[in-house]
Amino acid sequence: MTEELDHNEAQLMQALALQDDAVSKDFKAYAGEPKPADEKNASKEDIIEALKTVCDPEIMINVYDMGLIYDIRQKDNGDVEIDMTLTAPTCPVAGVLPQQVADATALVEGVGKVEVKVVWEPAWSLDKISDEARAMIDLL
């Protein structure tokens, strides 16, 4: 139990240290390795499903349904570029959420290197939330 608390505290401290970087205009997170040339590229649907495993810890709704993912670009070699935003520049998980998105995407079979760029335009707003997420919020 103590080990788990130490790990959680370390993650929180890392997130706070990275928060200032995440609000800068050029914050990016990276994950993955080059995909073997003979491996089939992942489908966009598989990437979206992976993104749905990453949740905003404050409201426990995934980043895709929250409308935080603005663009997913797949390259011919399997590399993936994602533009995402955060609910606010002062978001407490600004330093870790983009890395979690990169890591989850890199786990998808058929994905090579992943780059997640935090963008601030257009600004996130409640109208970007999916109908499924709205239904979940109504239940809270």
Image: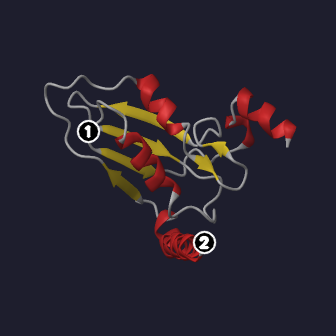
Q: Foreground residue, 35 or 20?
A: 35
Q: Which residue does the numbered mark 1 point to in the structure image?
A: 112
Q: Residues within 10 Å of mark 1 (few under 14, many from 20)?
A: many
Q: Is residue 108 above or below residue 92?
A: above
Q: Position of residue 31 (x, y in %)?
A: 32, 51
Asked which secondary structure carries label 1, the reply is loop
Circle nearer the N terminus (2, 1): 2
Gap between marks 2 and 1, in whole Å?
36 Å
Q: Position of residue 43 (x, y in %)?
A: 37, 22
Q: Position of residue 104 (x, y in %)?
A: 43, 44
Residue at horizontal 85 percent and vertical 43 percent from the top: 140
Q: Is residue 30 above or below residue 9?
A: above
Q: Is residue 86 above or below residue 9?
A: above
Q: Describe the colour scheme in one phrase.
A: secondary structure
Q: Is residue 21 above or below residue 114?
A: below
Direction from residue 59 to residue 80 in the image, left or right:
left
Based on the displayed image, in which of its 4 quarters is residue 52 positioned? top right
Asked which secondary structure carries label 2, the reply is loop
Q: Which residue does the numbered mark 2 point to in the structure image?
A: 1
Label 2 amino acid? Met
Q: Residue furthest left?
A: 37
* Disc 2 versus disc 1: nearer the observer: 2
Q: Position of residue 10 (x, y in %)?
A: 51, 75
Residue at horizontal 38 percent and vertical 55 percent from the top: 29
Direction from residue 37 to residue 1 in the image, left or right:
right
Direction from residue 37 to residue 53 in the image, left or right:
right
Label 1 amino acid? Gly
- Any mark on residue 25, and which? none
Q: Residue furthest front?
A: 1
